[in-house]
Image (cartoon, rainbow, N blue to C red):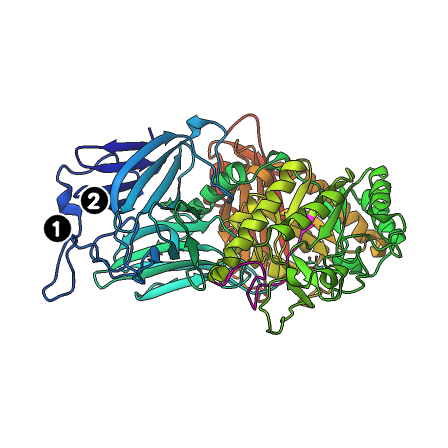
Amino acid sequence: MPIRFDSDKNVFYLHTPKTSYIIAVLENKYPINLYYGKRIEGLPDDIENIIPTRRDGGGSAQDMEGTNLSTDLLPMEYPTYGSSDLRTPAFHARYSDGTSVTALLYSEYRIMKGKKLLVELPCTYIEDNAEAESLEIYLRDALKGLEVVLCYTVYEKYDALIKSVRVHNDGNENIRIESVLSSTIHLYGSEYQAIHLAGAWAREQNLLITDFIGGKFSVDSKRGASSHNHSPFLALAEKGTNENYGEVYAMSFVYSGNFIAEADEDCYNTIRMQMGINPFNFEWVLEPGQSFQAPEVVNVFSQDGFGGMSRTFHDLYRSRLVRGKYRDTVRPILINSWEAIGCNFDENKILSIAKKAKILGIEMVVLDDGWFGHRDAPTSSLGDWYPNKKKLPDGIKGLSKKIVQMGLKFGLWVEPEMISEDSELYRKHPDWCIHIKGRRRNLARNQLVLDLSRPDVCDYIINFMTEILSDRNVSYIKWDMNRYMSDIGSASLPPEKQREIPHRYMLGLYKVLENLISNFPDVLFEGCASGGGRFDAGMLYYFPQYWTSDCTDAVERMSIQYGTSYVMPIAAIGAHISAVPNKVTRRSCSLETRGNVAICGQLGFELDPNVLNDYDVKMIKQIIEKYKQMRETIHNGDLYRLKSPFYDGMSACNIVSKDKENVIFFLGTFTSKPFSGKIRIKLKGLDKNASYSDKEGKVYSGEFLENYGFLFENVIDYTSYIILLKKQNNGG
Ligand code: GLA
């Protein structure tokens, strides 16, 4: 039983295989985070001794409802501001009398088998009720008629704690919600480091580890998307934590819009760590009888360092967040037209790429930007989703049919959430974009954002996408989104609901995506937002893979893919081999290194195969052949990061299939000094009692590989190695 209620102590235990989360309800009124960490079965008889109730003299801690307790000192399970607790709240609202104090008291609980899906939002799921248990804790503010339901799920198999929050207005007056975060935990002491993933366009998900020195540490997005700048992820780890050892508390948000993740330390060294929708510029008017569902946060506690944390995220996300046919099947190796030809092509050009791609062993041709309206550069036509007949005389239907007849799959790029000023759609519906009447409509990448808070705009997207996808030869969609929201306003919402737009937009987007993926279950969707500008757990619910970055330079990619793997399974990481010098960095890496980096993700190509020389053709065929041998392991295997591009001047990892039969070892180096010595890298996660052989027939014991490892000498700049190992049948 993963969830248990001890009625004597008024304590809830939520167990995963290796962790425990314990909530105590003090005075039968105040739920607190009593414990989160390594699994423990029980508590001392007298739990009073482990509850922080210390009060200083003076007026520093106010009592709560005449009790001896002050919520200002307690690790509140779902903190509100102003009625004793004066720290950063999870929930904050304004009431019709103009006041902003909420006082939530415990009322009841429910423990259920399984897990409910969240209404209108992406979420982790179950396939069988026996997989998980859920707890709902009901809190009420009787004066304001407010009910808050804290929802928790623990799985039998994964070391993750899923939290979300539902708010209901039971009263007679509107409640204006100003903050409704989804997860709060409390840690003690000051020996923590904050770990987050930050970046920019073409430099996504760089790993940053900084000492948490008290005060407040936060990462957020106000951009209308989770953004390139910060991933919706935050971890606090005890100092000295590495890939294999150390305690880590991590939060990942299953949401793709504005978010906040923060750690806030009070004067008694209690750190309140929280995550949820960014309260900045957020407001939601909850009318009597209405409910609001806040998205879910996946909390992971790992005792096995960052590696343990990532493997939990990977296992949960790839099996109980990603959905559809491509969850369990390896995905086609694709060639994408963007870097090779941009918007400048005709049907013959695409067919010539397809012909060569087929010879190389590529399985799908993806036509990127430029096929619709009169789009000859990324300056016009977004919204006009009909084929450009000058480039494609037989339309998409004609082209896709020809490509499928060649024995390849066909995929298409779209950017449905956007509109160009120079488009038929804009001329017809100038009000359909996000804008403020009377203000300049500021462009980014020459485009405006469609107002997906409007149901008519969502229907328009569903309709044209349905039209495109009813061509059964289209078996893949690259769903792009190339600018953030600015000048936020909606022509269809009243003044008091304007601050709801960014969240309403996300609900609209999720509704559209849900409609399309359920009506076209065989289509593979890949997400994209100028590369990884919205690569978050919310998107994984709809898109099993994501275009990780517009930077395809292999050396930069080592960092980007390493950081991304902190949360995302590597099978979700779109990684393409492109031509050199690289378009973003101007760097030239060998084809071997470009290949070795790309095959550690979801392999694709981003080049014109017609201009390859004989060596390149031979090499690419080998890369594809190798990838086909390893892609099952990429899809399902356990990732062990061995060397960090951020700290070690090189990137190394090994991936081990669940049955430990197959191992992929990768090493990629950066700049090196001549004759600077040997590099020895120990592998992880193997069967120590087995023997493994490489492609040349060299045999190593698992024990040797884990303790001695591989030795590399005189490694030069940007060299890389992939070593495939297979377990020998005869054991150790
Ligand atoms: C974005 C994407 C690219 C490509 C272009 C097309 O930048 O990230 O991969 O699709 O748009 O305009």
Q: Quadrant of residue 403?
A: top right
* Image-based side of 636 in relation to 182, left or right: right
Q: Tell me, yes or no, whether the highlighted magenta stretch contains residue 494.
A: yes
**In the image, residue 370 lies at what x, y percent?**
78, 58
Q: Which residue is mark 2?
A: 29
Query: Is residue 551 visible to the viewer in this orientation of the structure?
Result: no
- Residue stretch in magenta: 478-495
Q: Residue furthest front?
A: 172
The answer to whether mark 2 is within 8 Å of ligand 1 is no
**Which SS type dominates the magenta stretch?**
loop
Local packing at callout 2 (Cα closer than 10 Å; few below 14, some 14-19, many 20+) is: some
Q: Which residue is mark 1?
A: 67
Q: Is residue 375 visible?
A: yes
How far is disc 2 from disc 1 in space, using C-alphas? 10 Å
Instruction: Let me know if residue 133 is in the magenta part.
Output: no
Pick whichever, 656 or 384, lies toward us: 384
**Quick check: marks 2 and 1 in contact, CB under 8 Å?**
yes
The residue lying at 77 percent from left, 65 percent from top is 377
